[in-house]
Image: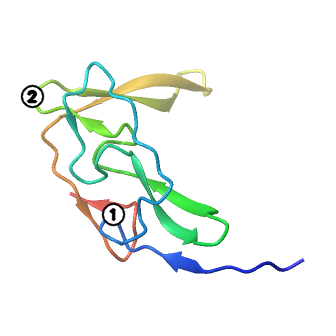
Amino acid sequence: MPHASNIIYCDGPESPHAFDVVPLQPRNGSLDAMCPVCKGRGQWNTEIDLVSFRCKRTACDRCHGAGWVETGTDPIGLPDIEVSPEGYPRWTIRFEPSDTEMEIDPAQPGLTKT
């Protein structure tokens, strides 16, 4: 059964409805400051229906969905999956430098250019 809808498409975190119904992420003790891109939310809407509030979201590439970033020189540990020598996937921790500056590609929200 069809229902009323008013679907809005967001080009990135600067869009007017990008953060509608997106909660703030709790601060992880190892990270220092609120992410300047997603403002502590870790994600934003790429598409939202303003009637039902159903939405599609993308994770922030600057903070990797945590909502918080490291301001010092400590590397950031991120969960990742790698292939073991036996050929099976296994969980691991991938470390990235904290000073990596990301830009949002407006043509493909959620994907970044370094």
Look at label 2 and name its amino acid: Gly
Quadrant assignment for the N terminus:
bottom right
Closest to the observer, 74 or 91 = 74
Q: Is residue 73 left or right of residue 65?
A: left
Closest to the observer, 23 or 72 = 23
Q: Is residue 45 left or right of residue 75?
A: right
Kindly identify which residue carries mark 2: 72
Kindly identify which residue carries mark 1: 13
Q: Nearer the viewer, mark 1 or mark 2?
A: 1
Secondary structure of the residue carrying tag 2 is loop
| C-alpha gap between disc 1 and disc 2 | 24 Å
x and y, in percent, of residue 72 in the image: 9, 28
Q: Is residue 25 left or right of residue 113?
A: right
- Specify the color scheme: rainbow
* Mark 1 touches mark 2? (CB < 8 Å): no
Q: Is residue 9 above or below residue 91?
A: below
x and y, in percent, of residue 9 in the image: 49, 77
x and y, in percent, of residue 11 in the image: 38, 74
